[in-house]
Image (tube, rainbow, N blue to C red):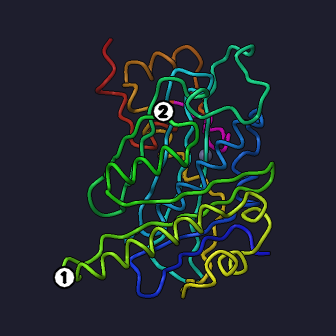
Amino acid sequence: MHTDVIQRFYFSGQPVRGAIVKLQNSFVESLNGHDYPPFVNALLGECLVSTLLMGVHLKHQARLSLQARGNGVVNLLMGEAQIKSSHGELTQHSIRAVARLQSNEKNEPDEPLLPLNKLIGQGHLAITIEPDQGERYQGIVEAKKSSLSACLEDYFQQSEQLPTVMKLVTSPTIAAGLLIQRMPSSDDRAPTNLIEEDNAWQEISALAATASRDELLSIDNETLLYRLFHEHNVNLSPAEKISFDCSCSEQRTSQALLKIGFQEVSKLLQLDNEIVMDCEFCSARYRFTQLKLEQLGMDFTEKIQP
Ligand SMILES: [Zn+2]
């Protein structure tokens, strides 16, 4: 069975598109070193899978992230995917993830499958698309449903007017998912065609909804799609690879330091001679002395006031 792959698919003659994804190494590596409780690992798996499912139909290279923020046990969940613009067997997309929890340990649920809205509390989901070229886009939806997939289905229905079925499943070592989405049909369609399209969508979305957790976790994409949609003509695109890859760097981390301001940075340097910053996603450690920061372009001579 191929894992760490995503595949797009289309239904011949119908304005319906889909994608199916299965993560294993990239999922496990994204969680490595974090030591999150199992329910957070599961949520991050869903986050990563849905981020990929939402991003794989983009036409241009972009960074796409899904963030859930709230006042519950889980303060922040974030999955991020770097989507490559080329499509085909050699395409490699990358992912990373992070979560922040309330420090109070007695708040930690024993049950691994508490509803999303209970874990996030009062909060929202933000979908952000940052194309390498072009404008940043952000869509927001309330995190008030019991699952991430239900919140995202709402988002697509309300914000994009795209009826959507999304299935997200995880085990401790695998995260998988399925997306089916109805595209706007062209305006010149005859009303009879629209009724046919409505019927086809009803049927295809109902079939997609029957995909079970076990099937999504353990059956290869081609077999599963055949099992679900064998009465339809499905065109499956070549598998595209997914890997864990953190995009942090010394340069980027120093940019974050710039944001807290020169005064603050020089104060920290006076206290300790160096500033240590850990990447929240991959735990890489960056150390900045004044000399290092000057080499990276931070100008201390003019900015520091006596
Ligand atoms: Zn990193």
Element on which disc 2 rests: loop
Residue 126 rendering spot, x and y as whole percentages: 42, 41
In the image, what residue type sits under mark 2?
Lys
Q: How far apart are marks 1 and 2 (CA)?
A: 38 Å
Residue at left offset 61%, top offset 29%: 100
Residue picked out by circle 2: 144
Q: Quadrant of the C terminus?
A: top left
Question: Is residue 76 covered in magenta?
Answer: no
Vertical comparison of 291 with 61: above or below? above
Residue picked out by circle 1: 188
Q: Answer with left or right where residue 236 lies relative to residue 181.
A: right
**Mark 1 Cβ inside 8 Å of ligand 1:** no
Residue at left offset 46%, top offset 43%: 295
User: Which image quadrant for residue 78?
Assistant: top right
Tag count in the figure?
2
User: Which-is-in-front pick, marks 1 and 2?
Assistant: 1
Residue 179 rendering spot, x and y as whole percentages: 54, 64
In the image, what residue type sits under mark 1?
Asp
Vertical comparison of 11 with 209: above or below? below
Q: Answer with left or right where residue 295 lies relative to residue 72.
A: left
Residue at left offset 70%, top offset 75%: 224
Question: Is residue 282 covered in magenta?
Answer: yes
| Magenta segment | 278-289
Residue 94 rendering spot, x and y as whole percentages: 58, 61
Element on which disc 1 rests: loop
User: Which image quadrant for residue 90?
Assistant: bottom right
Task: Report crowding for label 2: few under 14, some 14 to 19, many 20 or more residues within 10 A (C-alpha).
Answer: some
Residue 145 rendering spot, x and y as whole percentages: 51, 37
Nearer the N terminus, badge 1 or badge 2? 2
